[in-house]
Amino acid sequence: SLGVKRNVKQLHWNPIAPAKVAKTLFASLKPSFDVEKVAGEDLEELFSNKPAKAVTVEVEEPKEQEKKSAGILDQRRTTNIEIMLSKFDLEPKQITDGIRTLDPTQVAFSMDNIQALSAMKLTDEEVLLSMAYKGDESDLKLCPKAEQFVYHLTRLPRFANKISAIMAMRTYREAAAEIEEQLDVALKAFQEVKGSENLRKFLSVILQIGNFLNSGTRKGNAKGFKMEVLGKLTETKTRDRDVSLLHVMSSMVEEHCPDALDFPKDLSHASRAKRIEKSEIQSELSSFLKAVSVMGREITALVQECESTKSPTELSRTPKSPSVSGGIAKSPAVSGNVERKPSKFELSAPMDKPNGGAST
């Protein structure tokens, strides 16, 4: 008998043919109890094909703890500074502690961290609002991390200079080497130009030809000429405009003084030196020296602050620390007043601002 068909879900299996059951494990099975008698009704209810009863479960959405603003930053600035802080593995107070000590072991900050700090410039208004905050630090912890950071940062004396000092500590060797390399190239190029006998011969031919062509005019009988005329040698053409003055002159030199045509071999540094602008290298050097000067002052100030916290006994055992800024050698290349231009060594804020200063 197939039994009674029930309105339940079926178990889709492949039954063994009755003739083959005797040779399987199933032939010796003896039921321990009658499933239909013990749990028939429950099974029929559990696996019924009838629609299940709808169960309404109320899920309470987790409420985010709202951050209370301290009134230091607006929403846009809060978001931007929060993005900057996400690059750090430190809490706001730990970051400002690292700035205060100038991170001498280079453990607290990566180079990306320092660049992010240098790029973040507080406005005067933000500094004033931060200094005006009088709440407890326990209340401050309920505020956005951006405002916590600005609060602790603005309570560091000369915070902008400290950030600049950290940047200078990481980059001054590389920057000094780059400037020194440019000066070395320029000096070698100058020495090559000054010492090239072949170049003097070539310039002598140009001077003679120029005086010949300008004879009888106020530009004739010249004792020398400015170098920009060299570009005009290709522009001055013969009467039939077939060849330039440079071509004629080169043919003349090749015939009567062929060695002079080898003057480019004497100027191996000229191609690199021509890309160096005097005003730019002066500006870079001036900016570099100012950044190193700030670094020296901040290191000296930090040493003095550490010594001021020592007991008289500790001070008597500590050798006097020399001024860092006094040990910085000044380059003989810097003389006179150099016009100030922005550069990669630019300080993050003016040095004469109170409490570290703020950009406008």
Image (cartoon, helix red, strand yellow):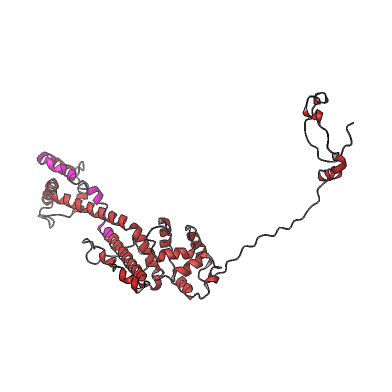
Q: Which image quarter: residue 175?
A: bottom left
> How many numbered discs, if any?
0
- Residue 154: x, y in percent? 44, 70
- Residue 310: x, y in percent? 36, 71
Q: Is residue 239 visible?
A: no
Q: Main secondary structure of the magenta part?
A: helix
The question of residue 53 being in magenta is answered with no
Left-right relation of 251 to 312: left
- Is 256 in front, or is 305? 305
Instruction: Please determine whether, in this image, residue 28 is positioned above or below residue 57.
Output: above
- Residue 344: x, y in percent? 35, 59
- Residue 46: x, y in percent? 81, 45
Q: Which image quarter: residue 265?
A: top left
The question of residue 276 being in magenta is answered with yes
- Is 336 in front, or is 35? 35
Quarter of the image where the C terminus is located = bottom left
Residue positioned 13% across, 54% down in the render: 224
Instruction: Please determine whether, in this image, residue 337 is positioned above or below residue 7.
Output: below
Left-right relation of 121 to 210: right
Q: Is residue 144 visible?
A: yes
Left-right relation of 339 to 306: left
- Is 111 in front, or is 327? 327
Q: Which residues are magenta?
A: 254-281
Q: Which image quarter: residue 4?
A: top right
Quarter of the image where the N terminus is located = top right
